[in-house]
Image (cartoon, grey):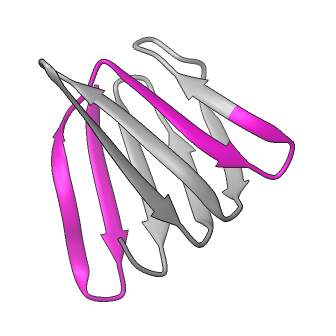
Amino acid sequence: MDIEIITPKGIEFSGKAKRMILPAQSGQIAVLPDHMPLISVLKAGKMKITAEGKEIEKEIEGGVLEVEKEKIVILLKKF
């Protein structure tokens, strides 16, 4: 899956991932390849990205998530 994380400063992260776990308003969301299209509001919490051989974990303050067929766009206040 292609992931793009955008803040007011611009594109903060762009790359491929195998899995993401995000803190949504209704609870944690796991996004895997071929996930159904989705738009969700994110709350403050931990975001985990699993890429080829590494895991990135960041605290976020909230934002918006958009999942398309093979692309994820995340809008955040800061990354």
Q: In this view, does 64 lie above or below 39?
A: below
Image location of residue 69, percent across then percent down = 43, 23
Question: 79 left or right of 21?
Answer: left
Magenta-colored segment: predominant secondary structure: strand
Residue, x 62% and y 57% (percent of image)?
45
Q: Give the range drawn in magenta.
A: 1-28
Q: Is residue 5 above or below residue 40?
A: below
Question: 20 left or right of 14?
Answer: right
Residue, x 40% and y 79% (percent of image)?
78
Question: 17 left or right of 52?
Answer: right
Q: In which quarter of the image is residue 62?
A: bottom right
Question: 40 left or right of 49?
Answer: right
Locate the N terminus and report the quarter of the image it occupies.
top left
Residue, x 45% and y 11% (percent of image)?
34
Between 8 and 57, the residue placed more toward the observer is 57
Image location of residue 16, percent across then percent down = 18, 31
Pick out the residue farthest to the top: 34
